Amino acid sequence: MELIITEKDNAARRIADILSEGGASTERSGGVDVYGWGGRRCIGLSGHVVGVDFPPEYSDWRDVEPAELADAPVTKTPTQESIVNVLKRLAREADSVIIATDYDREGELIGKEAYELVREANEDAPVSRVRFSSITENEVKSAFADPDDLDFDLAAAGEARQIVDLIWGAALTRFLSLSARQVGDDFISVGRVQSPTLKLIVDKEREIEAFDPEDYWELFADLEKDESTFEAQYFYLDEDDTEAERVWDEDDAEAAFDVLREAATAVVESVRRRTRTDDPPAPFNTTQFIRAASSLGYAAGRAMSIAEDLYTAGYITYPRTDNTVYPEDLDPAELLDALSAEREFADSVEILEDLDELSATRGDEETTDHPPIHPTADLPNEGDLSEDEWEVYELVVRRFFATLAEPAEWEHLRVVASADGASLKANGRRLVEEGYHAVYPYFGTDENHVPAVAEGEELAIADARIEAKQTQPPRRYGQSRLIETMEGMGIGTKSTRHNVIEKLYDRGYIENDPPRPTRLAMAVVEAAEEYADLVVSEEMTADLEADMTAIAEGEKSLDEVTEESREILDRIFDALDESREEIGEHLRESLKADKRLGPCPKCGEDLLVRRSRQGSYFVGCDGYPDCRFTLPLPSTGEPVVLEAECEEHDLHEVKMLAGRNTFVHGCPLCAAEEAAETEDRIIGPCPECNAEHGGELAIRRLQSGSRLVGCTRYPDCEYSLPLPRRGDIEVTDTYCEEHDLPELVVHDEGSEEPWELGCPICNYEEYRERRGLDGIEGIGPKTKEKLAAAGIEDLADLADADAEGVAESVEGVSAERVRDWQANAD
DNA sequence: GCAAGGTC
């Protein structure tokens, strides 16, 4: 039997399908799918199935000096037992083995790991290696027709990276965590990729903090031409004879403004018309995909997770790729034809099919790993995708369209005029050839109309304006710009960059989006800069890359490289160990600063966000145990101290991070006072159980901080109505006749007018009607249309509907899905 | 309980 090993199950299935001409059968053994046909078996790994770690005697953080890790041995152990077991069993029966992992460095290492597992079970079977860049019939068949050998040097380069990363990461992470006595869940981590990334964010914050704004002025005039006006901006030539619009001196600005204001006309001095070609974008690699998705509002991690789902479902190609050049096997015409089946794409396909020839753009990165991200010929059916998934899918499809489309053409018109010696300019732009924008609507195509004027023409000045402005601090990195910057610096990989950012959030190093560093992050970067500069610099990766190349080319050995690296780390620890106390003190101070809310109303010491032994968060006094003042925090989510402060209590507001349910809790002292006020105010009879059991409705506050109108017989009666999270609730004397409940008014500092909520039952019914079917998971725009046609337009309709009946009358909707929606609707 | 790299 010949055994084929791929990097992932998906690839195994598709390769089996190609090589067997569709005749492979699937056999599930030990929880792993194995594809078989003729004398062949094909199994997919799950990336690395073995991992590096220290021997168990190094696992206790307190028993082992972190510096010892610099010289500790590193071992490999299986991390995916079931796959390893099946692989070994198959290897025992194999006469020959073919490694078909991804065609990149990490793929070579994963291939070598598979090779070693095979050898443990079978000493003799010959092992070969095939390489292909995309799983197409041509590439796969020709790769298998001419197999090669594993590149052990290339794999060793990858192993060196594993060892260096583990040793540095673990040793420095343990050192900082121990020095700050943060050894539980909240350890303080350091690493070759995460730390330089964090430093990018910290450096930017330092620039912002050091930024000193400067005043300047800009001047504008409206010029008249044929009854309409267009805006022109004042400019002058600075010392270097270059055009400048910002006037840095107020007197100069006022003087120029006086000239403009007093001039009746401006004389056109020059008119320049130019056409500019606007080339269509290159195919998507991971970074550019993330960037495009981020302009649609998707965070990097979310975009990747949707892309992953679309890939697994077979609608798009593999989303982790560096490549921006389509493979030769890709036939655009064929793919367009398949995509034309979707109504939404038909118009765009028609535009492309009308072109004389279909030639795709090429990006600068041409790599062997995978094709650029593009749609496949398998299209999703209506209702298969959620709204978000559809939006991302459409982006990928349209990017593919754009890469085949014509360039766009802009006409730029530049008019320079003079008003009594003051220069004015207007830059117009007009899209004359829509080109790829017709099929890819994600880039702005705003035009700025400047009319055709002639040199020497005199234009009336309709209005003159002066605007006082200030220079702005540099912008923070958004997630996608951070990922692009990491790529430019060569740190992280296509598969890991977005995870690194998520890791920084998890570790309490950054908050918000765009991310801002915490005090802890600042302290970690400072400590690293002082004692282990290499680990926060991009150089560490650059040096390692150079060493890895040397290993791959046989110029250096793995041992030489790791030995050298261990020695550098040894020397770093000489200095670190001496400053342990000092570093720990600084880290502890910064940790406290991140948790500090403001003065304790009882004793004046600091109030801090703390965690109970049970793991729940609360606000406690730094003066504990002398001062026992505490305040509760909501039970959902992780608290983050915000910049905003409550004026009444001088306390910082708190935000609770809980994924999509994240909310601002506000000042904990205000919340506690409000809770005391609103607790259990009885407002009227419970419509559900009053007649029978005498239950009454009351305004209540839950532990999570949210309020609701609930029945006093809870939990026997679960009747409840929602209430807004913020604001004081006033119970008025006006009663709703239908429900016998008082009308409520919400007074919220954030809004000028109080909100007349009215009877809470009427309010809820109106809300449900207004909301319609929006916001229910799984109901996209198309499904919504179909349901409306069947008479289901709002939540009440949905709640009353008979699931089986709906399933019968609405195509493509199962009773099970309807019941899901009904469950989600409340 | 550490890293970074695969994959889900």
Image (tube, rainbow, N blue to C red):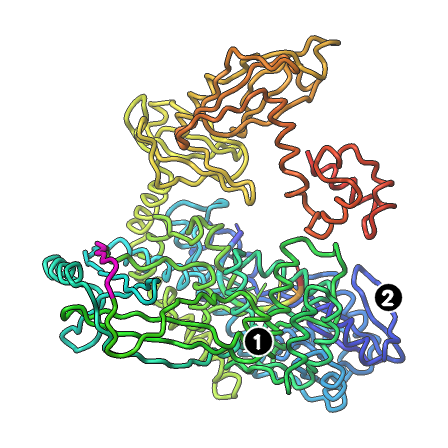
Q: At which x and y percent is residue A275?
A: 41, 81
Q: Looking at the image, is A144 positioned above or below residue A422?
A: below
Distance from Cα at disc 1 to Cα at disc 2: 37 Å
Q: Looking at the image, is A550 positioned above or below residue A387?
A: below
Q: At which x and y percent is residue A254?
A: 13, 57
Q: Which residue is mark 2?
A: A27
Name the residue rendered at 83%, 62% in the picture. Answer: A29
Q: Is residue A392 magenta?
A: no
Q: Nearer the viewer, residue A87 or A787?
A: A787
Please state, as top left, top right, bottom left or bottom right, where the C terminus of chain A lies in the image. top right
- Residue furthest out toward the front: A226
- Residue type at mark 1: give it: Pro
Instruction: Give neighbour class at mark 2: few <14, some 14-19, many 20+ (Cα, 10 Å).
Output: few
Please state, as top left, top right, bottom left or bottom right, where the N terminus of chain A lies in the image. bottom right
- Residue furthest out toward the bottom: A146
Q: Which residue is mark 1?
A: A283
SS state under label 1:
loop
Q: At which x and y percent is residue A791?
A: 78, 40
Q: Nearer the viewer, residue A578 or A272?
A: A272
Mark yes or no: residue A153 visible.
yes
SS state under label 2:
strand
Magenta extent? A460-468
Q: Nearer the viewer, residue A594 or A757?
A: A757
Residue A662 shown left or right of residue A631 in the figure: right
Q: At which x and y percent is residue A291?
A: 50, 65
Q: What is the chain identity of the residue bearing mark 2?
A: A
